[in-house]
Structure formats: structure tokens, C-alpha cells
Amino acid sequence: MRTLIKNGRIATAGDLFYGDIAIDDGIIKEIGSRLGGCFDNIIDAKDKIILPGGVDVHTHFNLHTGRAVAGDDFFTGTAAAACGGTTTIVDHMGFGPANCSMEHQLRVYHEYAKDKAVVDYSFHGVIQHVNEEILDQLAVMIADEGISSFKLYMTYDYRIVDADIIRVMKRLKALGGMLTVHAENHEIIEHLREELLSHGNKEPLYHALSRPDYCEGDAVNRLISLAAAAGGVLLYIVHLTTEKALRHIENASKSGAKVYAETCPQYLLLDEDLYRQEADEALKYVLSPPLRTKRNLEELWRGIREGSIMTVATDHCPFSISLDKQRGKEDFSQCPNGLPGVEERIPLMFSEGVMKGRISINKLVEVCCTNPAKLFGMYPKKGALMPGSDGDVTIIDPECEVTLTCQGLHSNVDYTAYEGFKLKGYPVMTISRGEVIVKDNEFIGQRGRGQFIKRKIMGEIL
Ligand code: URP
Ligand code: ZN
Ligand code: ZN
């Protein structure tokens, strides 16, 4: 199958130019002007902007929390991703049974994704306890399974204590793997939560007040120190939300630490005032870390512009507002945490970011496509438009105006956190390995067509 995308404006992390892209057998063969030849499919992208397919390295499909099950499986979740211009996802595996091996969860997740995923995918390993066997499994996961990044949590039930974090860091440093961390100070959260609840402060607003910005600032600062004690490791902070934590990362980076930050559209565009309304509305935004003040939002945009925030992912974790999230109505601590967003990411970053002048189109490509592919061992197969890369392409019509509504989106959940956002510019076509899988907001690909990506360690590709 040979496809030609012609007459578009091609945006990469470093360039913006008019040109054509020829894709042969799923792989980009040539990029240039007025490309000729025989093609099975010719797509006219006049007046459109062409990006590498989006790479979202933080989703939660098939997530079982014990209390609730997130709405999207690997079919509905990846179809929603595709409709929003994302062609690669890396899902955070959820916790398995106590004391299970990492391979156990990997097998479970391969089953979840097989015959369902419609875009290419990988998983981050999950570290829910630490012992010598788990440390030994890290090497197997990297070398044999193509899983080169691992997640641990500093809060929640399976939080990892500092001494064990150092052990993991040391092992990953030796292997070249990436450690990703949910960074919040658990003891402070527990203390504040108990205090608030005991005084009858149970509305959603108190979810945010039980996880103040200094929880994240402290945890990130501590991680940087733990990484120093371990002799340095590739450290990636997921869903960064605060100026406090960002400043710690910026200072550490200046001293040569390899610490990378991810943020998400909700932390760039939604602020904590959303908790100051009726519970039915406010519950939509119960997620961890919580939404922050406007000042933090501005600082995160600054971090993106200046390069101290390397990626924008989604932390897509959809629980229904009509059912699951209602559990938090009488007591915020009972509300399953998270919100949907895998489909909204590129449209929001284009309209709210590029069209409103907060970032350039090249910066959008850098943080939504190229950097995530590089950091997580998938570049230049993913995240790039160059000969040899997969033919993953998102075509945006900058004139297309869309008002975001839940009905217009494809995730299996009953709300969007961005209801009523008026967007200028929207993805009108998504191409995965040369195949058009979304056209005019309709998924037209085959269920199960997505392929598992065996990822490398960052050191092998950069
Ligand atoms: O509230 C959130 N973010 N839920 C998803 C799990 C996590 O912490 O990333
Ligand atoms: Zn998290
Ligand atoms: Zn998450």
C-alpha cells in the first residue's frame, strides 16, 4: 500500500515547511516537494498542518482500582486516542495481586491489549514492592520484553519507601532504564486528610486541600536527593502540577541531574476554582495530584516553553460521573481519582497552546510527539516525520472550529473535563503505519490492529 500526503504544511520539533510525504508499506519513504510516482491513496492536505502522530506516554486503560474500574479498555481507549490524533500510547500497568512478579502484570496487560488496541502501544512496568527478585526482573523486562521504563508511587497503598526507591534507582542506573514516579508526600496527605475528615470537611474541595503543592514539592525534591544517593538515574516525574516541584527540577537539571518532567492538559488549563461549585460538578475534577492555582498553570506553560517540562501526556483515567465518582459525594476520600483526556490532548494543545500563542507548533510536536518517543525508547520509529519512521501522521485543519462535548468524543465515559471549550483547529485525519484510521472524527480502522512496541533504553537511541 502506497500513500501520498501532498501539499500540507509539515511540522516537526525543529521545522515547519510545505511538502509531501510518501508512505510505503507503513513506513515513511520520502519527504519532499512535488513527489511523484504511483500511489494507492493520495491525500490532499492543502491548508492543513501535518504532525507526527501523537505519543501519549501516560494512560490507564483497563484500570481496576479495587473500588472501581476505569471506563476504557484498550479498544475504546485507543480508538479515542486515535480520534484525537494520537497514534502511540504507553499505558501504566495497574497493580496486581500482592507480591506478584512484574511479568505477571505484563502478561495480564498483553491479554488486555491483544485483539483490542487500534494504535501501537507499550506498557510501563509497575513496581509495587521491592526485593531481590523484583530487582532481577528489571533486567529481564528491559532485555527480553522491551519494557524500558518502570513506575513507582510514593503514595497510595503500594507506595515504595525511600530505602527501596534507592535500591530500584541503583539497579535501573546500571541497566539504563527510566524510573517514572508519582511524587506526593504520603504522610502529609494522610495527616491532612484525617484532620479534614474529622472536622466534617468532606466536599471535593477538601480533596485538593489535603494534597497541597508542598506535598509534590517535597516529594520531587526528595526524589532528586535519592537519585543523587543512588549515583544518578534517569528520573521522570509524571503529571507535574506545581511551580515548587518545577523549580526543584530546574535547579537539579542545572547541576547535571537527569530529571525529566511531564505535565498534562488538565494542569495547564483547569484550575482549583473548579472545586468551588456543587459536588456533582466538582467531583469531575477529583484527581491526584489535584488541580492547582492559576499561578501554577502559568508556571507550567513557562516550563514547557523553556524546556524544563519535556512532555505533555494525559494520565487518562476515566471514571463515570453518574456512578463511580458519586462515591465521593459524601466523602471526597471515597471518590476514584482521575479524569479522561486521551482524545482531547492534541486538540487542546493546538487550540489553547499554539493558536493562543502560548507555544509554537514545533513545541507542540516536541512535547506531544518527539520527546515522549525519545525518552521512552521509541524514536525515530515514533514521534518523527522522517524516512524510515513509521507512517504515523496527524492532519490538523487549523480553520476547523469545534466545541468540545462529551457526545462528540469517543471515550467510554459520561463526561469531559473540557465541556464547552471552543477550539480553533482540530485533527481531521489520523494515519497509523500508512493506514487512515480516523477520518472526520470517525474511527474507521480495525479493532486489534495496534502493535506492541518493544522499546529500547534511551541510551540506545540518543
Ligand atoms: O488521579 C489520578 N491521577 N489517577 C490515576 C492514577 C495516577 O495517580 O496516575
Ligand atoms: Zn499518578
Ligand atoms: Zn496516572
Image (cartoon, rainbow, N blue to C red):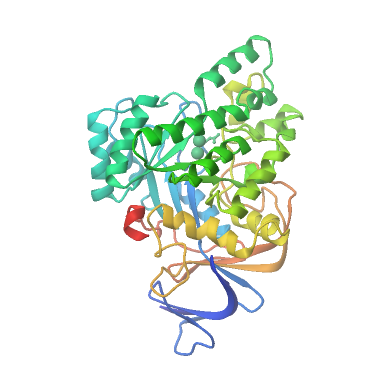
Residue drawn at point x = 23 percent, y = 49 percent: 144
Query: How far across and how far down the image is residue 63, in percent?
Result: 46, 37
Please name whichever residue, 273 or 421, is drawn nearer the observer in this view of the structure. Answer: 273
Please, is residue 210 above or below residue 135 in the view? above
Asked if residue 59 can be seen in this view, the reply is no
Query: How far across and how far down the image is residue 385, in percent?
Result: 48, 70
Q: How many labels does the image show?
A: 0
Residue 237 in the figure: left or right of residue 419: left
Query: How far across and how far down the image is residue 267, in percent?
Result: 63, 42
- Quadrant (top left/top right/bottom left/bottom right) for the N terminus: bottom left
Residue drawn at point x = 69 percent, y = 16 percent: 201
**Seen from this angle, which residue lies furthest front?**
255
Please, is residue 213 above or below residue 359 in the view? above
Residue 123 in the figure: left or right of residue 317: left
- Quadrant (top left/top right/bottom left/bottom right) for the C terminus: bottom left
Residue drawn at point x = 62 percent, y = 47 percent: 265
Query: How far across and how far down the image is residue 162, in percent?
Result: 39, 26
Please name whichever residue, 243 or 118, is drawn nearer the observer in this view of the structure. Answer: 243
Please, is residue 3 above or below residue 201 in the view? below
Residue 190 in the figure: left or right of residue 421: left
Asked if residue 48 can be seen in this view, the reply is yes
